[in-house]
Image (spheres, rainbow, N blue to C red):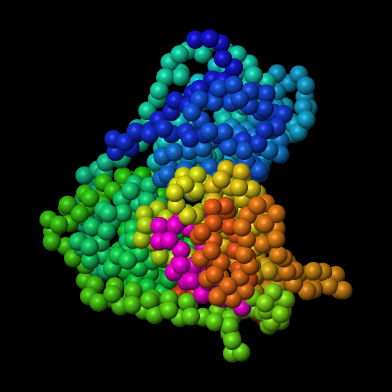
Amino acid sequence: MPLLTTGQALVRFLDNQYISFDGKEEKFVDGIFTIFGHGIVCGLGQALDEDSGDLTVYQGKNEQGMAHAATAFAKQHNRRKIIACTSSIGPGAANMITAAATATVNNIPLLLIPADTFACRQPDPVLQQFEQPYSLSVTTNDAYKPVCRYWDRVSRPEQLMSAMINAMRVLTDTANTGAVCISLPQDVGGESFDFPGSFFEKRVHNITRIVPSREEVSEVIDVILNAKKPYIICGGGVRYSEAGEALLRFSHDFNIPFGETQSGKSATPSSSPYNLGGVGVTGNLSGNRLAKEADVIIAVGSRLSDFTTASKSLFADNARFITINTNRFDTYKLDSVKLVADAKLSLLSLCEKLSLHNYKSEYKEEIKKAKEDWDIEMERLAAYRYDKDFKPLISAFDKKTIPEFVEKTGGIITQTAAVALIRELIDKNSIAVGSSGSLPGCLQRMWTTESLYSYNMEYGYSCMGYEIAGALGSKLACPNKEVYAFAGDGSYLMLHSELVTSIQEGMKINVLLFDNASFGCINNLQMSSGIGSLATEFRKRDKDGKLQGELLCIDYAKNAESYGVKTYTARTLDELKEALIDSKKQTVSTLIDIKVLPKTMTDGYGAWWHVGISSTSKSEAVKQAYEDKDRNLKKARKY
């Protein structure tokens, strides 16, 4: 082999990584997202310029944004294809830390290669170097350690080999995947080494299904046989295992309903008679009703987060738990009976064993009735309109906000009616992308999915700014499908830079911007907890020096239009309908600025969420909120 720089060797290695799943082999690394800076451009940048192989080089506009796009790309491929991300040192590297946490919490493979300061230390402190007096070995990149599944620093060229092999180990691990950080000092990136040819040979990483053990299957069977009304939680593990059909068979054969987590949604069709939709804090009427009545909860591929369990308050006190997961850590939650195995193989094995016992649950008409009741509620939400007798769906609100919003923007669209209309008009196989605010609640409850993997919701970290970048990543993964980013105005302001990248790449995405002139979700939480509307609405400062002045009204359509995006402003449902229909005809990215009335999002359905209410306050409303919290906490499980 000729001498190669560390950067050149890294590119060649990445270009030869493949995965095999259920006998299907495919290339693992699609390309590299980058924003070049002095720390990376002369090492890895030179290598990519000279010979990038079959890797596509993408130009990001914000390091966090491009890493979110890579995360969404990997999720859309069910974790079997990735785009690596590289940045310069200092602020460029720090910008990707939030994205690293987002990927790790959601168990999505994300390879990050931030540049680092000089290994030789000769020019210290180099431009953008972060120095700690107690240790010269500490750099900005050490901040990745708490939020990555694997972290390494390549301080010598030959270290690249063990670093990258371990990176691939983690990136292809179904139980413990997440962000991987390979820190690359800028001088090492350009240093040469006689790498052995074997390092660059084609590597096929087998993503294997963990076979359920006979002993654990037997324990699970014993619990289910004694269950009268079991209930399944369909988590992200069902999606990544491609276990949707197995779950449907399990539900049908044994008459067991299931609810979906945000990650599990679209692993099965919403039309299944056993699919009750969302469960938990953002769950719906039917999903939560039967979850509360269940005597056994079967969590398949779920982390059992507080939103799924309603802070451990949703289920009956005597309910038993079964957890099926490749991650042993997650199977130990809620004192569960554990089955550490692949979701698909586990469900098929349970089907086989339970059939021998002729098992059936004791549900009669409850499942059908729950779905029918939710259908009625969906009709109500879709028909929700603004008129002279208008009442917000969320009771806690400042009575001046809605009239002022209508006067200033002309917007009279309710959020629930907008979601229903969008679902009705766009293609059924379109991909919906979201992350934060009140929209994930509306979508988990109201969005229906008949097309597999058409719902890309990041809700493990609920990271504002994921929405538009995530839409780009989904589009890169599925270029022949329409992709819709559901974003609030707060998230748009926080991070929409990859909208420009979508124009650059000719990858059409559709941004549905729900503008309610606020961080609406947190404003709801704030006011329902007895707190005043403080710094959550977008208001100017008033004459008393407080952020209680007039509402800020922003023309987001004009902003996006300047990038080359086709834009629309919708103040009524008729205008929204026209915009949606016309946007489908476009070949460039679109943005619909939807002026949505505050406090018109879905809420409730019998779930409680534990937040830190102040135990001491002068406000009677805060005192009441604390009492409500204390009362609910006493009903919830302790661990």
Query: Is 29 or 257 nearer to us in this picture?
Result: 29
Query: Which residue is depicted at the point 78% across and 21% down?
Result: 123
Image position of 631 with respect to 303: above or below? below
Query: Would residue 421 be counted in the magenta stretch?
Result: yes
> Splitting the image into 4 quarters, where does residue 538 fall?
bottom right
Measuring from the top left, give residue 444's x and y in whole percent. 45, 64
Figure disc tally: 0
Question: Could you tell me residue 442's position as x and y percent?
Answer: 50, 68
Does the magenta segment cover residue 415?
Answer: yes
Q: Which residues are magenta?
A: 412-441
Depth check: give the residue in front, 44 or 350. 44
Q: Residue at x 71, y 39 (%)?
A: 91
Residue 95 image point, x, y percent? 66, 42
The answer to whether residue 86 is seen in the rendering is yes
In the displayed structure, 209 sits above or below 287; it is above
Position in image of residue 24 (x %, y %)? 31, 36
400 with respect to 368 (left or right): right
The one of 191 and 559 positioned closer to us in this rendering: 559
Is residue 219 depicted above or below 36 in this figure? Answer: below
| Residue 90 falls in image quadrant | top right
